[in-house]
């Protein structure tokens, strides 16, 4: 019932396409199970924040729940997927933490008061298809941060060798799926065997730095992983921390 109401609200609230198929939510817990290294990283940033903490594309609360546990404070989470928010609500309830979950698009981020930390884990900014979508999101983040507040996110760095190996190949883990690369559109399409789909548009380091520049944010650090290792030519993950 709640799900149906949220779906209806979502449909009325925005008719722009989002690159996330609701059916992907059904297997998201299994899909995301191999990713855990990011949790302590975002928890540490949250414990260093002296004000509101916001997760963009909060999903099922995989990171937001441990962040709320680590800080002892409410985390505000925004997502376009009613199904994912429903899962996050259930996770928060069973962990006994307070999440302020809101159905919304990160491109339209607007807070009642400025935050100390906005973060976006698990490459979720890559669900935004165009430069304009990302510029708008970065500008909304900048406007939502208090002076000195931080914005942190991670995204994969495109590797042609990985693309060659994976393109069109069926994989069983973490759930049965096939990945296809559309290089001309810098896009990866993930299709689960269930038919659920999700697309990601990769970006280069300079594109990310350009987004900081236009949004008036300053780069604090670019790591090559969640242990704080420096970003190098052979790094495969951008882990960014920026400041307003
Ligand atoms: C890979 S999951 C990440 C979930 C969670 N942050 C995590 O780390 O596990 C991507 C999430 O992005 C959400 N999403 C996609 N486009 C979005 C947008 N424009 N605004 C807000 N959420 C979005 C999807 O609904 C999905 O829950």
Image (spheres, rainbow, N blue to C red):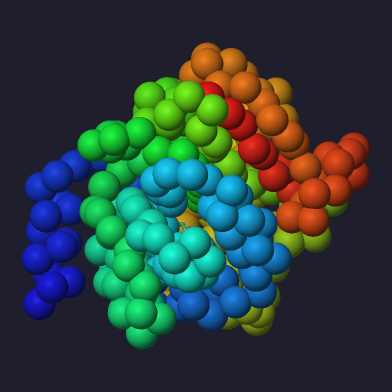
Q: Where 69 falls versus 73 (above or below)?
A: below
**Which corner quadrant of the image does residue 169 belong to?**
bottom right
Front-lying residue, 187 or 45? 45
Q: Please report the residue visible at 28 percent of the width from the left and 59 percent of the height from the top.
A: 101
Image spot of residue 199 (x, y percent)? 50, 51
Image spot of residue 64 (x, y percent)? 46, 63
Image spot of residue 144 (x, y percent)? 37, 31
117 relative to 218 in the view: left or right: left
Front-lying residue, 205 or 174? 205
Q: Farthest right residue?
A: 233
Number of residue marks: 0
Front-lying residue, 102 or 54? 54
**Which corner quadrant of the image does residue 21 belong to?**
bottom left
Q: Is residue 108 visible?
A: yes
Q: Where 215 falls versus 243 (above or below)?
A: above
Q: Please report the residue visible at 54 percent of the width from the left and 61 percent of the height from the top.
A: 190
Q: Please report the residue visible at 58 percent of the width from the left and 42 percent of the height from the top.
A: 152
Q: Farthest bottom residue?
A: 94
Q: Where 196 falls versus 111 (above or below)?
A: below
Q: Please report the residue visible at 48 percent of the width from the left and 70 percent of the height from the top.
A: 69
Q: Considering the image in quadrants, where does the N terminus appear? A: bottom left
Front-lying residue, 72 or 84? 72
108 relative to 10 in the view: left or right: right
203 relative to 107 in the view: left or right: right
Image spot of residue 23 (x, y percent)? 35, 70
**Which corner quadrant of the image does residue 115 belong to?**
top left
Figure quadrant, ligand 1: bottom left
Q: Is residue 56 visible?
A: no
């Amino acid at each position: 019932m709640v799900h149906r109401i949220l779906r209806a609200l979502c449909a009325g609230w925005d008719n722009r396409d989002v690159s996330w198929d609701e059916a992907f939510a059904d297997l998201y817990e299994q899909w995301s199970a191999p990713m855990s290294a990011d949790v302590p990283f975002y928890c540490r940033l949250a414990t260093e924040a002296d004000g509101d903490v916001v997760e963009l594309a909060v999903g099922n609360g995989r990171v937001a729940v441990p962040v709320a546990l680590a800080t002892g404070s409410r985390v505000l989470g925004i997502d376009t997927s009613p199904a994912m928010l429903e899962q996050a609500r259930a996770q928060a309830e069973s962990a006994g933490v307070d999440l302020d979950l809101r159905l919304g698009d990160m491109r339209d981020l607007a807070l009642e008061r400025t935050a100390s930390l906005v973060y976006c884990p698990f490459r979720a900014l890559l669900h935004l298809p165009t430069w304009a979508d990302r510029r708008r999101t970065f500008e909304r983040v900048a406007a939502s941060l208090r002076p000195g507040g931080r914005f942190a996110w991670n995204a994969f760095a495109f590797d042609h060798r990985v693309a060659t190996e994976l393109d069109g190949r069926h994989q069983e883990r973490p759930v049965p799926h096939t990945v296809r690369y559309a290089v001309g559109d810098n896009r990866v399409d993930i299709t689960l065997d269930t038919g659920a789909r999700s697309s990601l548009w990769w970006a280069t380091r300079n594109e990310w730095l350009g987004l900081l520049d236009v949004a008036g944010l300053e780069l604090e650090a670019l790591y090559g992983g969640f242990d704080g290792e420096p970003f190098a030519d052979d790094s495969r993950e951008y882990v960014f921390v920026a400041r307003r």
